Amino acid sequence: MDDATLRLGNVLREYGEHWQICYDDEYCVWTAVCYPSLTAQRFLVADDLPGLVVKLRAAQSGDR
């Protein structure tokens, strides 16, 4: 298993319960989607996995 897979595993363990995290090959971006209620959706996009983690941390702490 390579280092990138291990990092992705860590991100999924930390945020995967509330966020759907995936890599979009067509646009070459990482995305995270969360449904905090039946009528709401949060969508995060980043160029790389570390950038997505920064945005996930901010979202978890309530920052925008």
Image: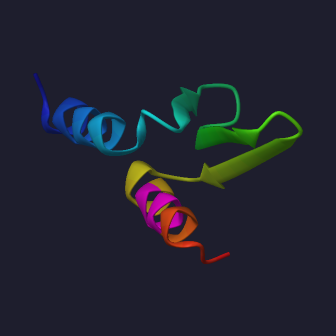
Q: Position of residue 57 (x, y in %)?
A: 44, 65
- Residue at (89, 39) in percent of width and height: 39
- Dominant secondary structure, magenta: helix
Q: Position of residue 13 (x, y in %)?
A: 28, 36
- Residue at (72, 47) in percent of width and height: 43
Q: Position of residue 41 (x, y in %)?
A: 79, 43
- Residue at (52, 71) in percent of width and height: 58
Q: How many marks?
A: 0
Q: Residue furthest top?
A: 1
Give yes or no for residue 17 being in the magenta stretch.
no
In this picture, which residue range is highlighted in magenta?
53-57
In the visual, does 61 lie left or right of 40? left
Q: Residue furthest front?
A: 37
51, above or below 39, in the image: below
In the visual, does 28 lie left or right of 53? right
Residue 7 placement: quadrant: top left
- What quarter of the picture does the C terminus occupy? bottom right
Front residue of 48 and 37 = 37
Residue 19 placement: quadrant: top right
55, above or below 47, in the image: below
- Residue at (70, 35) in percent of width and height: 27
Q: Residue furthest right?
A: 39
- What quarter of the picture does the N terminus occupy? top left
Q: Position of residue 3 (x, y in %)?
A: 14, 38
63, above or below 6, in the image: below
